[in-house]
Amino acid sequence: MSDGLAARLFVDSRGHLRGPWRLGIFLVLVVLLTIALREIVLRIWGVPDNGASIAVSVAIMLPAALGASGTVMARLERLPLLALGLQWNRLGARSFLLGSLLGFALIGSVTLLLVLLGWLRWIPAAGDTADYASAGLWLGVLLAGAAWTEELLFRGYPLQVLAQIAGFPFAIAVTSVLFGLAHLGNPGAAPLAMVNITLAGVLLGVAYWRTYSLWYVTGVHFGWNWSMSLADLSVSGQPLGMPSVDAVVEGPVLWTGGAFGPEGGILLTVVSVVAIGWIWRTRRLTRSLEIQATGPLPERRPSAF
């Protein structure tokens, strides 16, 4: 193999590092930062109990994902984080809020159907309204951090580089399957639950494709998860628990999702498919002009070999 051919395996004709190598660098950075931050956080926090495990995970993984994303965007792409879909202004806040409302609406519709069908009810539990509000706010902060972390790792740099290489359909398919597999170890992860998590990945990927806003996508993810936790329903198999109320889920597990939560049932499958179709076609969603002006990665087509 000639030196010129070997060089072209790493860089394209314009001297840019090829996509697979950039993705590899991103993943290595995530791993290294995770290892380093884990040592720091555990020294400060100690070994967490079950109640603090989400907080510790967010404290480790969010800075790792954000640090790796900022590094590759600045060093490899010569672009700001804005190009990744993160607007640090009121437009970004608005996108996050609108995405959160959509996430709430999607899971809210499933919750309402469960109630109307007589498969979901709530009974009083220990605690009062103040306890519920305090726990809900704390879970909101944690779930917002967790959603942002996962979006940086899936719909952030990886999806956008894959879209640059082979187009959005390929990028959304690959990242959605990986998103589903990442939840394979969750409690009660049955085949239908994995299908639904993968569909959720498709929904979030299409939402990014329509908006170029990672804040919007993070909002959808956050609203989706927070609405389940506020209803005292398991989030992807994780029973987070809320004071003052206990959710009682009855009826066929195939439809309700059982202990895994709504994401394990057919009702969520139907809602996800409808939502994907709406996001794909609606005129209410448009790509951010501010983000487009940066020349985001999906619009920077790589040169031929």
Image (cartoon, rainbow, N blue to C red):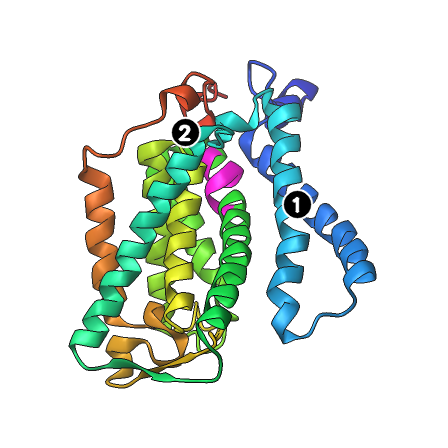
**In screen coordinates, is 186 left or right of 36?**
left
- Secondary structure category for the residue under label 2: helix
Between 21 and 155, the one lying in front of the other is 155
Lower sequence index among marks 1 and 2: 1
Question: Which residue: 50% across, 21% down?
Answer: 305
| Tag 1 residue | 63
Up-down relation of residue 242 to residue 213 (above or below): below
Q: Which residues are magenta?
A: 154-160
Please, what is the three-letter code of the amino acid marked with disc 1?
Pro
Label drawn at residue 91: 2
- Secondary structure category for the residue under label 1: helix
Question: Which residue: 24% across, 76% down?
Answer: 255
- Residue at the top extreme of this rendering: 14
Question: Which residue: 83% across, 60% down?
Answer: 43
Dot in front, 1 or 2: 2
The N terminus lies in quadrant: top right
Please, what is the three-letter code of the amino acid marked with disc 2?
Leu
Q: Position of residue 203 (x, y in %)?
A: 32, 49
Snapshot quadrant of residue 188:
bottom left
Between 125 and 115, the one lying in front of the other is 125
Up-down relation of residue 280 to residue 89 (above or below): below
